[in-house]
Image: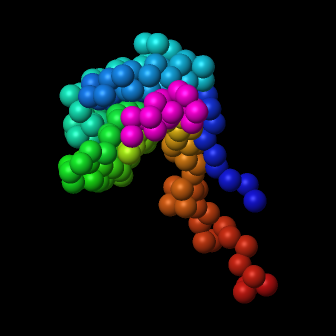
């Protein structure tokens, strides 16, 4: 059966990248790769805005503010949370995840989740370009695909917008 799918063509689209400064050793690698993915898929440098926030906790608020402007086809959220010895990690992970998801749902602007949640620094390094690829690159590809899908869905006529045929012009089998 035919299905609507997004493509990997960022031409003519605008993206915002919200990146945490905390754990910059990791987040800068995610950012570099996210920009690389956007450019490789056809985005214009002028169509990419980078917004830096202090830590991962601030990502959802910045993402929501950007999404509300309606200037962006998708928002890419990048950060790195490392588990410590207290419950702080769990609280922050839950709030960041919930906040990004809620912002996407309430604004209708796709948000790509590129926030690493790792137990160790080694895991974060692996996900920022070594053994596990680069999650910033992957998040950017998700943003491109979802922006494309949103455009494709917007072009599809909805059931309520389809041209209606007046009842008098319909072929009614009961009258035959």
Q: Is residue 73 visible?
A: no
Residue 132 among magenta residues: yes
Of 95 and 170, the residue lying toward us: 95
The quadrant of the rendering that contains the C terminus is bottom right
Q: Residue at x 22, y 37 (%)?
A: 58
Is 145 drawn above or below residue 43 in the view shown? below
Rendered-image quadrant of the N terminus: bottom right
Image: magenta residue range: 120-137
Q: Nearer the viewer, residue 117 or 67?
A: 117
Q: Residue 107: within the magenta?
A: no
Rendering coords of residue 82 (x, y %): 32, 40
- Report x, y in % for residue 149: 56, 43
Q: Position of residue 55 (x, y in %)?
A: 23, 33
Q: Residue at x 31, y 28 (%)?
A: 23
Picture quadrant of residue 155: top right
Looking at the image, is 57 positioned above or below residue 28? Answer: below
Position of residue 91 relative to residue 142, above or below, is below
Say which residue appears at 71% left-offset and 78% top-offset: 172
Q: Please tell me in which quadrant of the rendered image residue 49 appears.
A: top left
Say left or right for 171 vs 81. Answer: right
Residue 162 visible at all: yes
Instruction: Tell me the residue at 39%/26% (across/down).
Output: 26
In the rendered structure, the answer to whether residue 142 lies left or right of residue 79 reads right
133 versus 52 height, above or below: below
Q: Nearer the viewer, residue 157 or 20?
A: 20
């Amino acid at each position: 059966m035919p299905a609507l799918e997004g493509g990997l063509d960022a031409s003519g689209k605008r993206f915002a990248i919200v990146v945490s400064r905390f754990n910059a050793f990791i987040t800068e690698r995610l950012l570099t790769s996210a920009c690389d993915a956007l450019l490789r898929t056809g985005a214009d440098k002028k169509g990419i805005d980078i917004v830096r926030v202090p830590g991962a906790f601030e990502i959802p608020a910045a993402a929501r503010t950007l999404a509300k402007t309606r200037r962006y086809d998708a928002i890419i959220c990048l950060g790195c949370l490392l588990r410590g010895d207290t419950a702080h990690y769990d609280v922050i992970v839950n709030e960041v995840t919930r906040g990004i998801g809620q912002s996407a749902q309430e604004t209708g602007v796709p948000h790509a989740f590129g926030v690493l949640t790792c137990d160790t620094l080694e895991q974060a390094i692996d996900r920022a370009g070594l053994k596990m690829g680069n999650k910033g690159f992957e998040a950017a590809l998700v943003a491109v695909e979802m922006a494309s899908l949103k455009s494709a869905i917007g072009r599809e006529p909805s059931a309520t917008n389809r041209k209606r045929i007046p009842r008098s012009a319909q072929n009614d089998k009961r009258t035959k």
